[in-house]
Image: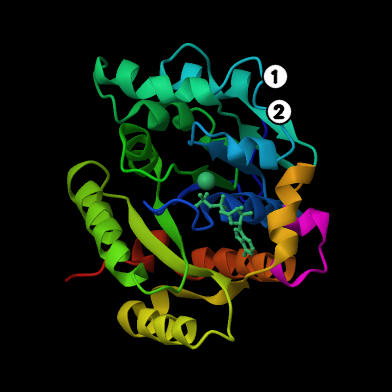
Amino acid sequence: MSQNSAGEIAKVFCIANQKGGVGKTTTAINLAAALAALGKKILLIDLDPQGNATMGSGVDKNKVQSNLYQVLLGEASIEQTRVRSEAGGYDVLPSNRELSGAEIDLIQMDQREQQLKQAIALVLDQYDFILIDCPPTLSLLTLNGLASAHGVIIPMQCEYFALEGLSDLVNTIKRVHNNINPDLQLIGLLRVMFDARVTLQQQVSAQIETHFGDRVFKAVIPRNVRLAEAPSHGLPGTVYDKNSRGAKAYIEFGNELVKRVKKEALKAIAQPPRQ
Ligand code: ADP
Ligand code: MG
């Protein structure tokens, strides 16, 4: 069995936001590729039945032998199911529409919110980071993600209702922290699809900084068409056009995350904020 580069177990992070189209999958793919480029061993778990993280990593979701559905039901292991993203330099645990049936099948199981965690436990020593791309719902699937993770990274757009939506998510994180997974922390908020020319975005960005302080990542991901084009080529944006502003921002974010995780013991990073 291969050891990860630090000789420690993997840090497991969910990329979550209960809104759709806010940049979760783009963040998951590009962060995976950015960390892989730093020499880290990465597993990207596609927890969304849409399979966008799978496809965007250059893996055909309809041609895989097994997928996360079988893993969650205990019918296949992660080792049997993972596929290499040659494009990104990381492993992918693929998903497709079959995963949407898991919600119903899981309900019948004992410890239904712990299935992913049990599967991940067997590969924790093989990776530096395990990133989980969550679906845009607070479903049993997302709960499996949150139950498995050390922390949550929240990508968000600096728009009018952003803060309101955020408090629901932060409350969810607190509830999972208190009831299911005491290890779960809020790692940080990542501003994505940012357009500095828009005054409202600057204002919301400043509000987020006031409210969440050092939990806001310094790296800001700009709105950048190269990031949006990359998935149709089955490539992370950081590989598709590494000189684009979007790619550079995600690489900066990867560096910042590694530093943040190294600097502070993970537990001390951030308790979910009190309200
Ligand atoms: P989610 O996973 O939260 O639903 P996605 O990552 O799929 O969101 O992003 C939604 C759409 O926005 C996609 O078409 C994606 O290519 C595009 N997108 C994401 N981030 C950026 C960005 N920084 N600049 C431009 N387009 C982006
Ligand atoms: Mg997505």
Q: Amino acid at mark 1?
A: Lys
Residue 9 visible here: no
| Front residue of this view, candidates 145 and 221 | 221
Horizontally, is 17 left or right of 9 in the view? Answer: left
Numbered circles on residues, count: 2
Residue 265 percent across, percent down from the top left:
42, 64
Residue 230 visible here: yes
Which residue bears the numbered disc 1?
63
Are there few (<14), some (14-19), or many (20+) residues within 10 Å of tag 1? few
**Ligand 2 within 8 A of label 2's CB?**
no
Is 8 a magenta residue? Answer: no
* Quadrant, the C terminus: bottom left
Q: Amino acid at mark 2?
A: Asp
Mark number displayed over residue 60: 2
The residue at 59%/70% (across/down) is: 256
Residue 159 percent across, percent down from the top left:
42, 73
Residue 34 percent across, percent down from the top left:
69, 57
Q: Is residue 216 above or below residue 87?
A: below
Magenta residues?
236-246
Residue 106 percent across, percent down from the top left:
31, 20
Horizontally, is 34 left or right of 242 in the view? Answer: left
Q: Secondary structure at mark 1?
A: loop
Is there CB contact under 8 Å for labels 1 and 2? yes
